[in-house]
Image: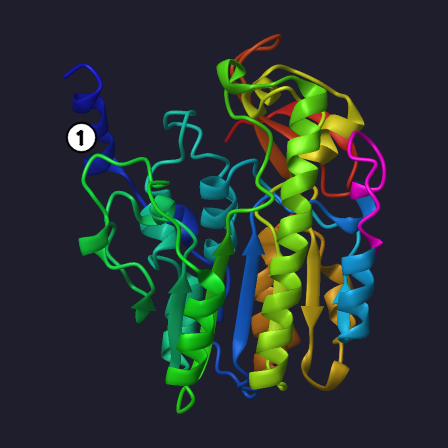
C-alpha cells in the first residue's frame, strides 16, 4: 500500500501539458506522402563514437552498406534521455519532458501510454490519413496494456500475461514487418519497428560481469544488430523503393560502465557521457534527395518535427525546434535530481535542471 497509494495519486494528477506544441504543427498537411519506416535498434551507438572511447570497434562495414544504399548518416547525433521509455516519450512528443522533475525519478510516468500512441506524432500521421503500425520485438513497451492508438500492433494484448516485466517472449520483427508491408499496399503507412539488440550493458550491479566483459557482450550483440539492419533495409528497399527509412536508436550502449545505473553517479568523463547518449541516425530520403535543413538534426527530440517539415514543404516548423540538450538522473556524489549533461552546443557539462 505504501507504494501503490502514491502511484494512484500520480495517475490522478498527471498532466500531458508538457506535450503542448509552441506552434500549429499538429495541423500540418503533408504534400509528400511516402511510406515511412522508423527502425530502432536498441542502444545502437553512433558511427562517430563506436570507433573510439570505451567501444573501440570498427563498424565501418555496416556504415558502408548504408552509404551504398543511399543513406545519409548524421554524425554527432544523440538521444536527449538515457532510457528507452524516457527517450521515446520525448521523441514522439517532439518536446522535452525533463523527466517531469516533480515525479518519481526511477521510471518516467505514463511513458508507455505516450509511446503506444498518446502523442502528437501519431495524431499527425492519422490526420494525414496514414495507417500507423507498431512492430515490437518484445512486449516491454506495452506491458501494462496502455490504450493502443496505433492502427496495428504485431503483439495482441491476449498474448501478454499479467504481472510481467515485458521480456517473456520475442517476436520476429523481420517477418512481422514483411507481412505488414504486403498487407498495407493500399495505404500510406508509418511503421515504428523495435529491435532489442545491441541493447546496453547490465542494468544492475548484481547482474554485471564487469566493464570488459560487458563491453564484449555488447559488441557481440552489435554484430547481430548489424545483420538485422542489413536484412531490414534490403527487404524494405526491394518492396518499397521510394520510401523513407530512418534508422536511429533510443540511447547509447553504456559501454565503459559496469552497469547502466552506475550512470546515476556523478561523472564528467566525456567518453562515459557520450556512451550514454550517442545514437546512430541514418536516413534514406526518396531519390537520394537530402533536404539541406536536415543538417540541424542533432538529437532525437527534433527528428519528427524535421520530418514533418520535409513532408509538408513548410520550413517554418523548424523555427520551433527544441534545444538539443541531453539530460540524466544523478543520485550519488551530487544532490539527487535531473542534470543537463550535454548542452545544446554538444559540450559535456554538469548543470542541475530546475523549472
Residue shown at the point (42%, 55%) measured from the top left = 20
Task: Check the image and tell me how it is coloured.
Answer: rainbow
Q: Residue furthest left?
A: 1
Q: Range of the magenta residues?
A: 50-60
Q: Residue furthest top?
A: 333
Residue shown at the point (60%, 10%) measured from the top left = 334
| Residue closest to the eye, 88 or 261 | 261
Name the residue tied to disc 1.
8
- Prevailing secondary structure class for the magenta stretch in the rendered image: loop
Tell me where residue 217 appears, x and y as whole percent: 64, 33
Magenta run includes residue 216: no
Tell me where residue 282 appears, x and y as whole percent: 70, 63
Instruction: Say above or below: 247 vs 168.
Output: below
Q: Is residue 75 left or right of residue 165?
A: right
Instruction: Say above or below: 57 vs 244.
Output: above
Choose top left, top right, bottom left or bottom right for residue 168. Answer: top left
Choose top left, top right, bottom left or bottom right for residue 321. Answer: bottom right
Residue shown at the point (76%, 81%) measured from the top left = 288
Residue shown at the point (72%, 37%) measured from the top left = 343
Label 1 neighbour load within 10 Å: few <14, some 14-19, many 20+: few
| Residue closest to the eye, 60 or 26 | 60
Count of residue discs: 1
Residue 240 visible within the image: no
Residue 310 visible within the image: yes
- Looking at the rendered image, the quarter that the N terminus falls into is top left
Q: Which residue lies furthest to the bottom in this view?
A: 186
Q: In this view, does 25 lie to the left or right of 80?
A: left
Tell me where residue 61 appears, x and y as whole percent: 81, 58
Q: In this view, does 121 lie to the left or right of 322?
A: left
Amino acid at each position: 500500500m505504501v507504494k501503490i497509494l502514491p502511484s494512484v495519486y500520480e495517475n490522478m494528477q498527471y498532466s500531458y501539458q508538457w506535450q503542448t506544441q509552441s506552434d500549429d504543427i499538429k495541423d500540418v498537411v503533408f504534400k509528400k506522402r511516402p511510406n515511412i519506416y522508423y527502425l530502432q535498434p536498441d542502444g545502437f551507438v553512433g558511427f562517430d563514437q563506436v570507433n573510439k572511447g570505451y567501444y573501440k570497434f570498427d563498424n565501418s562495414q555496416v556504415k558502408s552498406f548504408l552509404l551504398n544504399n543511399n543513406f545519409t548518416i548524421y554524425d554527432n547525433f544523440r538521444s536527449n534521455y538515457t532510457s528507452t521509455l524516457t527517450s521515446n516519450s520525448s521523441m514522439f512528443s517532439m518536446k522535452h519532458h525533463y523527466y517531469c522533475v516533480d515525479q518519481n525519478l526511477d521510471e518516467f510516468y505514463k511513458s508507455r501510454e505516450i509511446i503506444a500512441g498518446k502523442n502528437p506524432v501519431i495524431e499527425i500521421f492519422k490526420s494525414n490519413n496514414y495507417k500507423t503500425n507498431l512492430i515490437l520485438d518484445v512486449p516491454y513497451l506495452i506491458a501494462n496494456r496502455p490504450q493502443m492508438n496505433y492502427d496495428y500492433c504485431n503483439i495482441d494484448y491476449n498474448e501478454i500475461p499479467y504481472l510481467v516485466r515485458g521480456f517473456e517472449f520475442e517476436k520476429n520483427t523481420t517477418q512481422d514487418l514483411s507481412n505488414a508491408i504486403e498487407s498495407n499496399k493500399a495505404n500510406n503507412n508509418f511503421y515504428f519497428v523495435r529491435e532489442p539488440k545491441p541493447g546496453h550493458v547490465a542494468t544492475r550491479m548484481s547482474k554485471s560481469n564487469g566493464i570488459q566483459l560487458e563491453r564484449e557482450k555488447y559488441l557481440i550483440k552489435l554484430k547481430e544488430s548489424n545483420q538485422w539492419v542489413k536484412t531490414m533495409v534490403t527487404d524494405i528497399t526491394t518492396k518499397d523503393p521510394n520510401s523513407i527509412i530512418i534508422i536511429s536508436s533510443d540511447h547509447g550502449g553504456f559501454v565503459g560502465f559496469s552497469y547502466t545505473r552506475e550512470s546515476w553517479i556523478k561523472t564528467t568523463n566525456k567518453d562515459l557521457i557520450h556512451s550514454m547518449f550517442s545514437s546512430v541516425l541514418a536516413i534514406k530520403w526518396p531519390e537520394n534527395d537530402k533536404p539541406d535543413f536536415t543538417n540541424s538534426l542533432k538529437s532525437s527530440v527534433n527528428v519528427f518535427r524535421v520530418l514533418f517539415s520535409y513532408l509538408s514543404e513548410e520550413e517554418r516548423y523548424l523555427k520551433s525546434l527544441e534545444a538539443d540538450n541531453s539530460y540524466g538522473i544523478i543520485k550519488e556524489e551530487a544532490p539527487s535530481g535531473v542534470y543537463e549533461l550535454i548542452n545544446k552546443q554538444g559540450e559535456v557539462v554538469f548543470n542541475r535542471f530546475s523549472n
